Image (cartoon, grey):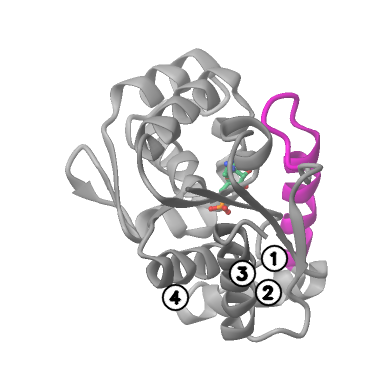
């Protein structure tokens, strides 16, 4: 069974999807981590991010391994390195380039082959797994999303103001919704869940309820 969870930045997709996968005994796939990984590898290699051909070459040449919430590139653990503000704001180059998307979509489909999986991102229901059995669109008010991300960053010791996080998030939302390939949009057959005012536990409970109902054929 394939469960897709798409939605804007900061809607709480990653933590909800990870916990949902654990409860169901499914694989968890964080596709945003893959776009971040390509960005990190390109910066390490000294590649100009606007150079689309070089970025696609990096996406094809690196070995990205996702193990639960750990991410490794060519054997090096980059789990924390790909979550910095620098990588977050630079990842749109990788996400906007069709050559990079094509490669990552291919990898995502390979990972899902024959597996029970919860996969989260922006284009999972619309582009990568249009035939997924269960599609969820997770969203929340933009201020709440920015507050959540700001709290995460403060926990990691990053000094950024809430206003700056909100401003950058607006730019990212706009980019995510308007990119020519793999844009963020709700699939017509997805169930929309608004997480405003819900605790993380309540969000996962709701998602589990949706998937269990689908498993029973409801
Ligand atoms: O979800 P996360 O914030 O980690 O994603 C990082 C970036 O990768 C997002 O800003 C988004 O633009 C991009 N992305 C994407 N397609 C996906 C997942 C993420 O374009 N399936």
Which residues are drawn in magenta? Answer: 164-184
Disc on the earlier residue, 2 or 3: 2
Pointer 2 with pointer 3, Cβ within 8 A: no
Does residue 156 appear left or right of residue 128 in this picture? Answer: left
Q: Is residue 97 left or right of residue 79?
A: right
- Foreground label between 3 and 1: 3
Label 3 secondary element: helix
Which residue is nearer to you in this view: 44 or 71? 71
The residue identified by callout 3 is 207
Q: Which mark is residue 156?
A: 4
C-alpha distance separating marks 2 and 4 = 14 Å
Reading the image, the residue beneath label 1 is 165
Residue 177: say if magenta: yes
Q: Residue at x 50, y 72 (%)?
A: 158
Callout 4: SS? loop
Mark 2 residue element? loop
> Quadrant of the rendered structure where residue 215 is?
bottom right
């Amino acid at each position: 069974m394939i469960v897709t969870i798409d939605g804007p930045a900061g809607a709480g997709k990653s933590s909800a999807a990870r916990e949902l996968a654990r409860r169901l005994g499914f694989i968890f796939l964080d596709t945003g981590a893959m776009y971040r990984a390509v960005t990190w590898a390109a910066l390490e290699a000294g590649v100009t991010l606007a150079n689309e051909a070089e970025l696609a070459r990096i996406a094809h040449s690196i070995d990205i391994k996702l193990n639960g919430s750990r991410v490794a590139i060519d054997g090096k653990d980059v789990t924390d390195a790909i979550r910095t503000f620098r990588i977050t704001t630079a990842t749109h180059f990788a996400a906007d380039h069709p050559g990079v998307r094509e490669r990552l979509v291919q990898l995502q489909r390979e990972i899902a082959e024959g597996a029970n999986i919860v996969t989260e991102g922006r284009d999972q229901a619309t582009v990568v797994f249009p035939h997924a059995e269960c599609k969820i669109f997770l969203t929340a008010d933009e201020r709440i999303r920015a507050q959540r991300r700001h709290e995460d960053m403060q926990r990691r010791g990053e000094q950024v103001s809430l206003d700056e996080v909100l401003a950058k998030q607006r730019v990212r939302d706009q980019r995510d919704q308007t990119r020519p390939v793999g844009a963020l949009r709700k699939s017509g057959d997805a169930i929309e869940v608004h997480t405003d005012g819900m605790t993380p536990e309540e969000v996962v409970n709701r998602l589990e309820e949706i998937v269990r109902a689908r498993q029973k054929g409801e």
